[in-house]
Image (cartoon, rainbow, N blue to C red):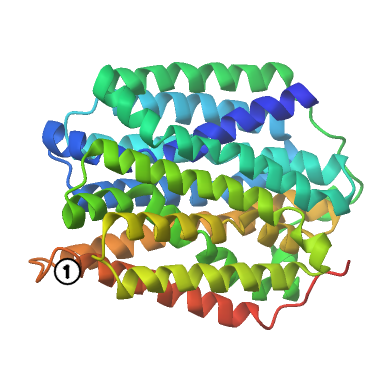
């Protein structure tokens, strides 16, 4: 089982990579195929929407056919196939199609590992295991930053995508060969999506799940690139270094959050504290959008660190799920998270377009940061009334 978890972890590294690598390709894709920030925002949003749309089918598949076949088949066809389409792209439409396919392929890998954790390990260990998996996967953000910028400059972005196609396909084949499905629990036939919706405690968690990762995923996955290029005149190397720092902060934040619920005796207040600090960092970008590349980089890193609450929030939701609803319940929570990023990307792309022609270089980005701050504040307000997990 350990080898299988390791391969699922590699699959999640690829998932994190694919949702974030567009930022450093912004200059190359603009010059080579005419894909501007609005095009890339749309493509990034398609990745997240395709990923989110697959969560309910993935939840059903995990509960019926198991994680091995679900993760392997989708990662091979969608992930490997989508990377190939991207490598062959000649117009922005091809990027849109590729990102949608890759989103479908990446949809099951994290939930497959969470499904195994929930079935094979005690509930008290779930939040730590979930945080470790997210922390490992977030290294994909690091690879999608400066290393991807170097690869694109050295061998070209097309050759880089062909290499990713090969790695993704081999990972999918490995998952098929190595992962073992947990035993099906009693009561599986009674599980349904409607039963998940009947768990009232989850309704106070869905909103924070929808916004907590939205601005982190949207900023790291795309907007940090155009923002740094337009406002500070940053080149690919500078953008790559900034995204590397933000990605490292996300990794550190994920591992930091893992044990905090046990230390503090509360899952809810760990999330509230981290989200509040995340909101403060975002407000810093709103009020000081053009105060220098260093300050902007540090604020982005703070958003990455304090915004790494995903695993803690999903563990909070998992604590209210009975065994027969684990697959459907966790994928529904994940749908909220990933769907929230998709909504944020589409809305931010519209906001960017509506802000043109810009009064100042930073004006469109202030609108985007304000949009993200409003979404986060609304989700946090609802979450304040949630029921805490007993420790």
Please tell me which residue is depicted at 49% across the width and 19% down the height of the picture. Answer: 167
Secondary structure at badge 1 equals: helix
Q: Position of residue 179 (x, y in %)?
A: 74, 24
Q: Where is residue 213 in the image (x, y as percent from the top left)?
A: 51, 59
**162 lies left or right of 376:** left
Let me know if residue 63 appears in the view: no
Pointer 1 residue: 354
Please tell me which residue is depicted at 48% across the width and 59% down the height of the picture. Answer: 302
Let me know if residue 373 appears in the view: yes
> In terms of depth relative to the viewer, which is nearer, 207 or 70?
207
Q: Where is residue 342 in the image (x, y as percent from the top left)?
A: 41, 56
- Within 10 angstroms of label 1, few (less than 14), some, or many (20 or more) residues? few
* The N terminus: image quadrant: top right
**337 lies left or right of 160:** right
> In terms of depth relative to the viewer, which is nearer, 340 or 193?
340
Q: Where is residue 57 in the image (x, y as percent from the top left)?
A: 60, 46
- On the image, which quarter does residue 223 sit in? bottom left
* The C terminus: image quadrant: bottom right
């Amino acid at each position: 089982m350990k080898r299988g978890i390791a391969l699922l972890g590699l699959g999640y590294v690829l998932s994190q990579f694919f949702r974030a690598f567009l930022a450093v390709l912004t200059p190359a894709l603009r010059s080579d195929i005419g894909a501007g920030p609005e095009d890339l925002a749309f493509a990034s949003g398609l990745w997240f929407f395709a990923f989110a749309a697959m969560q309910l089918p993935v939840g059903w598949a995990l509960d019926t056919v198991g994680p091995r076949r679900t993760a392997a088949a989708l990662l091979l066809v969608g992930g490997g196939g989508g990377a190939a389409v991207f490598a062959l792209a000649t117009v922005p439409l091809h990027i849109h199609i590729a990102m949608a396919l890759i989103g479908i392929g990446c949809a099951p890998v994290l939930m497959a590992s969470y499904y195994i954790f929930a079935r094979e390990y005690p509930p008290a260990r779930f939040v730590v295991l979930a945080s470790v998996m997210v922390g490992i996967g977030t290294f994909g953000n690091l690879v999608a930053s400066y290393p991807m910028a170097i690869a694109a400059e050295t061998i070209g972005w097309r050759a880089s995508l062909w290499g990713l196609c090969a790695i993704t396909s081999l990972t999918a084949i490995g998952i098929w060969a190595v992962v073992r499905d947990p035993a099906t629990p009693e009561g599986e036939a009674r599980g349904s999506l409607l039963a998940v919706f009947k768990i009232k405690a989850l309704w106070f968690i869905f909103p924070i799940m929808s916004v907590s990762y939205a601005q982190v995923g949207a900023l790291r996955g795309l907007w940090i690139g155009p923002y740094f290029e337009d406002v500070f005149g940053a080149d690919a190397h500078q953008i790559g270094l900034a995204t590397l720092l933000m990605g490292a902060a996300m990794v550190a934040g994920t591992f930091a959050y893992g044990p905090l619920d046990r230390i503090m005796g509360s899952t809810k207040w760990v999330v509230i504290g981290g989200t509040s600090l995340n909101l403060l960092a975002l407000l810093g970008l709103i009020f000081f959008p053009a105060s220098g590349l260093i300050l902007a980089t540090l604020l982005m890193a703070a958003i990455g660190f304090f915004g790494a609450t995903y695993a803690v929030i999903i563990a909070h939701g998992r604590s209210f799920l009975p065994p027969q609803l684990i697959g459907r319940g966790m994928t529904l929570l994940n749908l909220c998270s990933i769907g929230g990023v998709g909504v944020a990307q589409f809305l931010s792309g519209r906001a960017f377009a509506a802000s043109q022609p810009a009064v100042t270089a930073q004006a469109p980005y202030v609108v985007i940061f304000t949009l993200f701050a409003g979404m986060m504040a609304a989700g946090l307000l609802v979450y304040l009334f949630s029921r805490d997990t007993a420790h």
